[in-house]
Amino acid sequence: MKLAALTDGTEEAQVTGFAIDHRKVAPGTVFGAFEGARVNGEDFIEDAIRSGAIAVVARPGLTVEGATYIADENPRERFAQLAAKFFAPFPETSVAITGTNGKTSCVEMTRQLWRMAGFHAASIGTLGVTTADERVTTGLTTPDVVTFLSNVAGLAREGVTHLAFEASSHGLTQYRTEGLKVAAAAFTNLSRDHLDYHGDMAAYFTAKIRLFSEVLSTDGAAVVWADDPQSARVIDLVRERGNRLVTVGTQGETLRLVGRDPTLLGQGLTIEAKGQTYKVTLPLIGAYQAANALVSAGLVIATGGDVAATIANLARLQPVRGRLERAVIAKSGAPVYVDYAHTPDALEAAIAALKPHAGGKLIVVFGAGGDRDTGKRETMGQVAVQHADRVIVTDDNPRTEDARAIRCDVLKGARGAEEIGDRRAAIGAAVREAGPEDIVLIAGKGHEQGQIVGDLVLPFDDVTVARECAA
Ligand SMILES: CC(=O)N[C@H]1[C@@H](OP(=O)(O)OP(=O)(O)OC[C@H]2O[C@@H](n3ccc(=O)[nH]c3=O)[C@H](O)[C@@H]2O)O[C@H](CO)[C@@H](O)[C@@H]1O[C@H](C)C(=O)N[C@@H](C)C(=O)N[C@H](CCC(=O)O)C(=O)O
Ligand SMILES: Nc1ncnc2c1ncn2[C@@H]1O[C@H](COP(=O)(O)OP(=O)(O)OP(=O)(O)O)[C@@H](O)[C@H]1O
Ligand SMILES: N[C@H](CCC[C@H](N)C(=O)O)C(=O)O
Ligand SMILES: [Mg+2]
């Protein structure tokens, strides 16, 4: 592609690629120079041009010599639009999911439901880029814009027609998933997380809501979990903008959840839609998984799926890796679950999911991540001691922080909890202590494969460790 095709100018130079990191620039690259949280990408413009950049997308008022200067007040957005022109075509139908918790679960369930309907579907998010045949991890929930768009284009080349992706608040703020048409966008819920990056809840909400106010196609549909305290604000905005609205939940209009009957291995759901009543057995436990299943069904229906068939397909959903995953049954008979709860709300939801299944004690093992929102730690401690019967506070990715200090923050809210820093030892203690009527919940790491200590990623998998401790 000629540069002129992107600038509407006359430049003959051939564009070979896009980069937002000057170290990835090669001859023919369009370089995006952005101010970041850590460094200023504008400082690398000269270096990028020396490496062969033929155009630079950046704020107005900078000095750019030796390359075409594409100046824009919102350079990240402009860069995404240009990159999308370069990488297109994309899958016919793409949907995005935002919210504090449930994004990964929903992209995974949506992908599965589409596949059951016969489509070639994929998902992108915390678990990586997933198709029916393989899963490749990218390291971030929402990869950087170049990785994202090139992956999405790659999926289209493989024949993927339907894509569900996670729109994290970081991703939305940094325009990592812009440029392609979003046919439907979903909101799961909003609660405390990531305030280290966004500052306060208002800014965090604004970051998320941009998915509906700017990213969602004007002729697209918004799917909203209607039972969250913040849902009304999202619904108001959707109505104001005039997008089609699909609401789901006990207060939902499109898919109304009128009954939820937990069984040993799942739950019976009664759903009203378009005047009809449907009954289906979801093979997953916990109110939160029912919520995610409904949001996913909402997305599939919003993009043309048949209501009755989609609801019926919920009975065939496979579990999502690391979300209430039963790792092992201890010798005592106690089941040991692994869950990715790493916010106060998620921890409460995970405990609530398991509590009805415990005849005896619910024992929870968890910690909080380093270099992340410190304010959520004490609340996570409070939630744990309030809702579980026994609490062991341990380490979860201390990163560059002092692990003991993080535990101390959590313990401020968790009176009476035990502290066992070493995660393996903590899991071992919980598994040994659990009696036949008890349940163990290991929260915070879910699918993660490592414990991040300083710059090191030490191999660690909660499921494997739980099995080893139970052997
Ligand atoms: C806080 C954060 O989101 N940082 C991400 C982000 O940073 P930023 O734009 O603020 O970048 P910066 O490091 O200040 O650099 C500014 C610019 O200079 C460029 N640069 C930088 C250095 C250099 O030598 N040359 C150069 O060109 C950078 O590429 C960047 O464009 O842009 C980088 C490039 O895309 C990301 O790798 C980086 O993710 C870091 C590693 C990270 O840990 N992110 C986490 C917090 C994150 O994004 N998490 C979310 C949410 C998780 C969830 O709840 O699911 C996610 O979506 O994964
Ligand atoms: N709908 C929900 N309501 C409340 N809690 C939920 C919901 N869905 C998931 N959770 C909790 O959040 C955890 C993470 O779920 P999931 O990975 O689907 O969310 P996410 O939004 O992708 O998280 P991340 O921000 O890390 O990408 C689950 O393990 C569970 O404890
Ligand atoms: N996407 C989330 C994951 C947190 C998982 C938890 N194990 C931690 O390290 O805090 C984040 O980066 O904040
Ligand atoms: Mg996720």
Image (cartoon, helix red, strand yellow):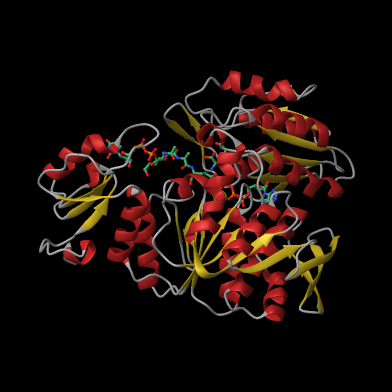
User: In the image, what residue occupies the spot 39% across and 56% down?
Assistant: 148
User: Which residue lies most toward the right here?
Assistant: 359
User: In the image, what residue occupies the spot 9% across and 46% down?
Assistant: 66
User: In the image, what residue occupies the spot 20% across and 40% down?
Assistant: 45
User: Which residue lies most toward the front here?
Assistant: 240
x%, y% of residue 138? 42, 50
Q: Is residue 294 above or below residue 40?
A: below
Report the side of 257 relative to 455 (left or right).
right
The C terminus sits in image quarter: top right
Number of marks: 0
Name the image quarter holding residue 239: bottom right
Q: Is residue 112 above or below residue 321?
A: below
User: In the image, what residue occupies the spot 55% across and 49% down?
Assistant: 208
x%, y% of residue 143? 42, 50
x%, y% of residue 46? 15, 38
The N terminus sits in image quarter: bottom left
The one of 418 and 21 positioned closer to us in this rendering? 21
Q: Is residue 323 visible?
A: yes
Ligand 1 rendered quadrant: top left
Name the image quarter holding residue 313: bottom right
Report the side of 402 relative to 425 (left or right).
left
Q: Is residue 471 visible?
A: no
The one of 323 and 433 positioned closer to us in this rendering? 323
Report the side of 344 relative to 5 (left or right).
right
x%, y% of residue 339? 66, 45
The one of 387 and 33 positioned closer to us in this rendering? 33
Name the image quarter holding residue 79: bottom left
